[in-house]
Image (tube, rainbow, N blue to C red):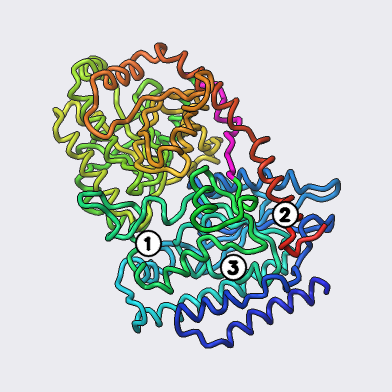
């Protein structure tokens, strides 16, 4: 069967599914039970053939978030692995939206395709369906359950139809789904990826950074006094057995053409022991740190980077005019819709020109609950009550201190940014006015350039630049799938204060606690409770006497360089691709 007839066969399969009467979650299970898992010929070139073909990455949306950054690395590895002497496969990025910041992450030559309805969480049709599935009651066999099953099926068919058509038109020989079949931001998209891949006969590398069952469980399973998990909402309707069984079935899909890539050993063990995946079909995929992170930091370069950041935070102006935090909180709902860069101060009317010597503290994350950014202000507030730090800050009267949060704020996390603002306001309200006006909070919301850069002959900032312009990195997260900021700050030669987050096994592997001392990343612990005087003194020395930690920072650079290379990531992809080609249960042939 040639490509055109295969594509027609796949499209007719979609139309056949559209003729079915789907009235419940059980009906969707019946469809999955009857999928042609081994009869569908591929609509494009077979993986492993020398014939020209492309690679499609599918995720919710592209920006400057951690998932998009990792996709850029994956794409570079796969391009290199699949390149033939006369052909480099085209990389196609498919998703619900592309923010302007994605231009700083994705390779310009890569194709982009907007898939309407594929975004997740609150951006999935305004959050209407996400809320109905995970925040509202949906009793088993209820009218609400039936209505939502029919709606998710309708959306899934539409998404699957467009995916099949795109796979056929662009002759994709491989799909790489990233997080859409592990974190239920959009169950219609997850179901569509299953339908499309099976009907189009295309193999899938399913890359999962985090799963819905990580830091999530039913309320009935929590012990008295146990805190609510960050993903407990996914279990809101777990007693609707058919619905929840569908979640477990497609998050992720254990299909014959699907190969699972996870980012830590705990995830791999859970898929194998709890969900019955074959060990040979699940690999732990590492990461690598780009060479730019290892660029030497100099005072002159840091000053240049801060000048460029000033134009971003100042909307084209070098001298910043911070917004009063109280005023900003009053219009927060409006700002959440536009999310432009902003720098805040205790009062209106102040001016700020960033200098190379100012204290710049970085939290390189989005504003979401598990990142616990408000804890940064607990630490900073305690520093101002610590006499040695306060004396140094008062003595250097021209010095300012800024906490810079780099990522955007998902709409559903408005309560989290409000909590950060309230904690910041509490800190500056407790300081004398002459000190409070020197303490700032900045949100750059993933923005790395400004429209005036071109006329001023300035280059956009990069993610490594955000590290190189700062003095200290904070990461007080409660949970992490990997903890990439630990590796990035170490590579950039920056001191780090981080929590020993959950899962503990993941944290220990990232910092290398099981390795020889020469390979371990050295860090200061962000405590769960009070801040010790030794930590406060260490931070004071780090900020005001940085030469004292130079040896520790050199050690960290060497440790990261030796453990996280592109070669290791490429080797993992090579193994996964070969197993897809060789799998006796797959149609993929050499």
The local crowd at label 1, few if under 14, some if 14 to 19, many if 20 or more residues have their Cα within 10 Å, is: many
x and y percentages locating residue 39 in the rendered image: 73, 74
The residue that label 3 is drawn on is 194
Between disc 1 and disc 2, the foreground one is 1
Please tell me which of labels 1 and 2 falls first in the chain: 2
Q: Secondary structure at mark 2?
A: loop
Label 2 to label 3, Cα distance in Å? Answer: 23 Å
x and y percentages locating residue 60 in the rendered image: 51, 59
Q: In the drawing, what numbered circle is on residue 234? A: 1
Left or right: residue 190 compared with residue 532: right
The part of the image, by quadrant, that contains residue 286 is top right
Q: Is residue 66 visible?
A: yes
Q: Is residue 100 visible?
A: no
Which of the image's four quarters has the C terminus?
Answer: bottom right
Q: In the drawing, what numbered circle is on residue 90? A: 2
Q: Is residue 306 above or below residue 368?
A: above
The residue at 33%/34% (across/down) is 403
x and y percentages locating residue 82 in the rendered image: 76, 48
Image: magenta residue range = 284-299
């Amino acid at each position: 069967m040639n490509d055109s007839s295969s594509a027609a066969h796949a499209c007719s399969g979609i139309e056949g599914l559209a003729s079915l009467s789907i009235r419940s979650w059980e009906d969707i299970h019946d469809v999955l039970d009857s999928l042609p898992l081994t009869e569908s010929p591929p609509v494009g070139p077979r993986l492993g053939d020398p014939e020209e073909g492309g690679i499609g990455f599918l995720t919710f949306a592209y920006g400057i978030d951690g998932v998009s950054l990792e996709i850029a690395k994956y794409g570079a590895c796969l391009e290199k692995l699949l390149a033939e002497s006369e052909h480099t496969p085209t990389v196609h990025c498919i998703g619900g939206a592309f923010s302007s910041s994605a231009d700083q992450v994705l390779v310009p030559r890569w194709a982009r395709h907007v898939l309407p309805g594929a975004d997740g969480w609150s951006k999935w049709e305004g959050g209407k369906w996400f809320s109905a599935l995970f925040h509202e009651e949906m009793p088993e066999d209820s009218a609400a359950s039936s209505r939502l099953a029919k709606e998710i099926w309708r959306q899934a068919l539409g998404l699957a139809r467009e995916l099949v058509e795109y796979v056929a038109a662009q002759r994709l020989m491989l799909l790489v789904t990233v997080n859409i079949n592990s974190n239920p931001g959009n169950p219609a998209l997850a179901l569509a990826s299953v339908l499309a891949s099976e009907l189009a006969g295309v193999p899938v590398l399913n890359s999962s950074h985090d799963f819905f069952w990580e830091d999530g469980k039913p309320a009935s399973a929590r012990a008295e006094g146990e805190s609510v998990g960050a993903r407990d909402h996914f279990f809101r309707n777990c007693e609707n057995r058919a619905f929840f069984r569908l979640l477990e079935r497609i998050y992720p899909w254990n299909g014959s053409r699907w190969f699972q890539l996870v980012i830590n050993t705990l995830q791999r063990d859970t898929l194998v022991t709890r969900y019955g995946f074959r060990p040979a079909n699940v690999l732990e995929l590492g990461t690598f740190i780009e060479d730019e992170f290892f660029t030497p930091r100099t005072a002159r370069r840091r000053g240049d980077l801060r000048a460029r950041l000033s134009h971003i935070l100042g909307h084209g102006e070098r001298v910043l005019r911070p917004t009063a935090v109280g005023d900003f909180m009053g219009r927060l709902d409006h700002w959440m819709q536009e999310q432009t860069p902003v720098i805040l101060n205790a009062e209106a009317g102040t001016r700020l020109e960033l200098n190379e010597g100012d204290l710049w503290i970085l939290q390189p994350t989005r504003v979401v609950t598990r990142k616990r950014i408000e804890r940064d202000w607990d630490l900073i507030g305690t520093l101002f009550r610590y006499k040695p730090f306060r004396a140094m800050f008062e003595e250097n009267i021209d010095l300012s201190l800024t906490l810079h949060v780099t990522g955007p704020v998902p709409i559903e996390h408005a309560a989290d940014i409000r909590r950060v603002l309230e904690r910041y306001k509490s800190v500056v309200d407790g300081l004398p006015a002459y000190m409070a006006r020197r303490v700032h909070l900045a949100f750059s919301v993933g923005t790395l350039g400004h429209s005036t850069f071109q006329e001023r002959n300035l280059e956009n900032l990069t993610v490594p630049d955000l590290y190189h312009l700062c003095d200290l990195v904070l990461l007080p997260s409660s949970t992490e799938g990997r903890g990439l900021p630990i590796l990035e700050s170490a590579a950039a030669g920056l001191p780090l204060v981080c929590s020993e987050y959950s899962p503990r096994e993941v944290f220990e592997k990232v910092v290398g606690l099981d390795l020889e001392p020469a390979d371990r990343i050295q860090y200061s612990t962000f405590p769960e409770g009070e801040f010790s005087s030794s930590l406060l003194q260490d931070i004071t020395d780090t900020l005001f006497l940085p030469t004292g930690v130079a040896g520790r920072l050199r050690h960290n650079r060497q440790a990261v360089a030796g453990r996280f290379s592109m070669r290791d990531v490429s080797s993992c992809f090579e193994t996964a691709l070969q197993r897809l080609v060789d799998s006796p249960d797959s149609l993929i042939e050499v």
